[in-house]
Image: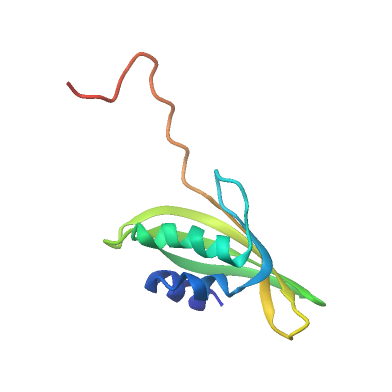
Amino acid sequence: MSKVFEDAIRTGDVVAAANLYADDGMIMPPNVAPVQGRGAIAAFFKTMTDNGFSLKLTPTDSWMDGKLASRTGTYIVVDKTGKEVEHGKWLEVWKLQDSGRWLLVRDMWNSSDPVPPPPTPGVSGDKQ
């Protein structure tokens, strides 16, 4: 599934990416409120793809128990030039739907990059 998701984001097919989520699926990106529902998830990913970002995903672990499954892994965000701009980890929860299809119900990720230092008091970044 990681390859399907990566390809959808890389090509800007945010509807295909959102269709991997259940109707009431939720993404929990860092530093923003949770986003729930396929339409809202597609809109979130559209902002990302419209700005030229794509992903490289590496699954590292998974488990399944009955109708629930989880996957974890790492990600790299790349800009339109291919430059790596962020590295992090992710956690997905999948649920087997009555239709027999596995869909994402929760998706959370956060950066592993160091937080930049706070600005020095009294020093402005503006050049005059």
Residue 45 in the image: state x and y as whole percent. Answer: 48, 62
- Nearer to the camera, 69 or 10: 10
Q: Colour scheme used in the picture? A: rainbow
Toward the top, the furthest residue is 122
On screen, 11 above or below 110? Answer: below
Horizontal side, residue 82 vs residue 77: left or right: left
Residue 127 in the image: state x and y as whole percent. Answer: 20, 24
On screen, 79 above or below 11? Answer: above
The residue lying at 63 percent from left, 63 percent from top is 37
Q: In this orientation, does residue 106 appear?
A: no
The residue lying at 50 percent from left, 58 percent from top is 44
Residue 48 in the image: state x and y as whole percent. Answer: 42, 58
Q: Quadrant of the N terminus?
A: bottom right
Q: In this orientation, does residue 65 appear?
A: yes
Toward the right, the furthest residue is 66
Horizontal side, residue 81 vs residue 16: left or right: left
Horizontal side, residue 15 vs residue 54: left or right: right
Toward the bottom, the furthest residue is 100
The residue lying at 39 percent from left, 62 percent from top is 49
Q: Quadrant of the C terminus?
A: top left
